[in-house]
Amino acid sequence: MRVYNFSAGPAMLPLPVLEQAQAELTDWQGSGMSVMEDSHRGKAFVACAAAAEEKFRQVLSIPDTYRVLFLQGGATGQFAAVPMNIGTTGSAAYLNTGQWSKKAIAEARKYVSVDVVADEAASSYTTVPEAGSFTVPASAAYLHYTPNETIGGVAFDYVPEADVPLVGDFSSTIASRPLDVSSFGVVYAGTQKNLGPAGLAVVIVRDDLIGSARPDTPAVWDYGVMAKSDSMTNTPPTFTWYLLGLILDWIIAEGGVAEMERRNAAKAEALYGYVDASSFYANPVARNARSWMNVPFTLADPALDAAFLAGAQDAGMTNLKGHRSVGGMRASIYNAMPMEGVTTLIDYMREFERTSA
């Protein structure tokens, strides 16, 4: 039986995509073999990879002045790749809004001088800095931020402005709503939330930021090297790339990112609405900083957490346990989570409250 998987990542995938992959698993495009067995240099897979890029450009309306790279190492690899590729001045500005910001800052400090221009520690990372409340040094090579903190369920309700290239880690929100790529120097994201299984990081980088990597940058993370080779300097994770293409087909067929935005807004509104109306559940995040993708909530009595999770599992809902650093529960409601999954969760929460309060 299929369950509603509320995991933060690897996350739930669209059932039609899984079924198509299943149907093609042993005989892809009449080749008599799986896409996983085909050469990444063969005409069939090269065409598959190129089609995935074109669909990605279509879904996100990516300008021609940007290159799209498909790299390994996930978003975590980009914590190092960004400063190694565009930290040419030796300094960079960062906004710290939670666990993933902290990890990006720690990694960047190995390569550049980091200026944390805003830090939300005072709120225990339940807020984002107000727009215009921070100053980015003119000497900074870029400003980096995490639009959505997966662990804390914190999200920016605006795009920061700066006179230096803006870099965003969109791992949790990529393709969940329209994005003005032209506002950024670099956009990167792990695929394992809205774009497929783990194994790839998609990187959208403006042309003028390519070609100035540090000499000691590994070739697989050098934007210039990978751009020249169409992201195939090494053997890429071909199955993940193939599935990315299928998910992009699904997004396009469902109505594109505009429809994803409508659905995601409705799901978040329903879940937050129930939590806010209840005295049994609570959400710690400032209302203007709430994530559409990752909704943390706590129970009035933490001693009931184990029973809540066990009951949810029995009701066909998995991976609702909150991150160990936050506690409580967390429902990740990415693109592939249908509204039915959210309403099933709310119905269960209502019944649990009734029988436990």
Image (tube, rainbow, N blue to C red):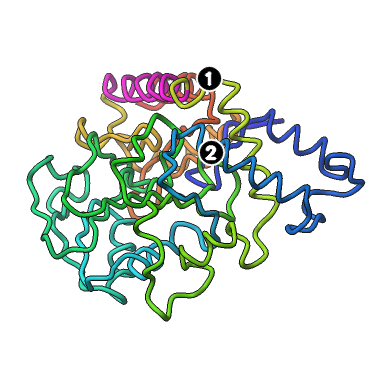
Tell me the SS state at disc 2: helix
Query: Is 289 situated above or below 113?
Result: above
Mark 2: few, some, or many residues within 10 Å (few <14, many ≥20)?
many
Q: Quadrant of residue 301?
A: top left
Residue 234 horizontal side relative to residue 140, left or right:
right
**Front residue (pair 7, 71):** 71
Q: Quick one: quadrant of the N terminus?
A: top right
Image coordinates for residue 39, horizontal then vertical, percent: 78, 58
What amino acid is at disc 2? Phe
Distance, label 1 to label 2, CA atoms, is: 14 Å
* Residue placed furthest toward the right: 32
How far across and down, in percent of the image, does residue 255 sit? 53, 19
The crowding category of the residue bearing disc 1, from other C-alpha atoms within 10 Å (few below 14, some 14 to 19, many at least 20), is few
- Mark number, residue 255: 1
Is 331 positioned to the left or the right of 42 in the image? left
In the rendered structure, which segment of residues is drawn in magenta? 260-278
Q: Is residue 78 above or below residue 343?
A: below
Q: Provide the secondary structure element on which disc 1 rests.
A: loop
Query: Label 2: which residue?
Result: 56
Upstream in sequence: badge 1 or badge 2:
2
Q: Is residue 148 magenta?
A: no
Q: Position of residue 314 (x, y in %)?
A: 60, 32
The C terminus sits in image quarter: top left
Q: Main secondary structure of the magenta part?
A: helix
Query: Which amino acid type corresponds to the residue marked 1 in the rendered image?
Result: Gly
Residue at screen point 60% across, 47% down: 197
> Which is more toward the observer, 312 or 168?
168
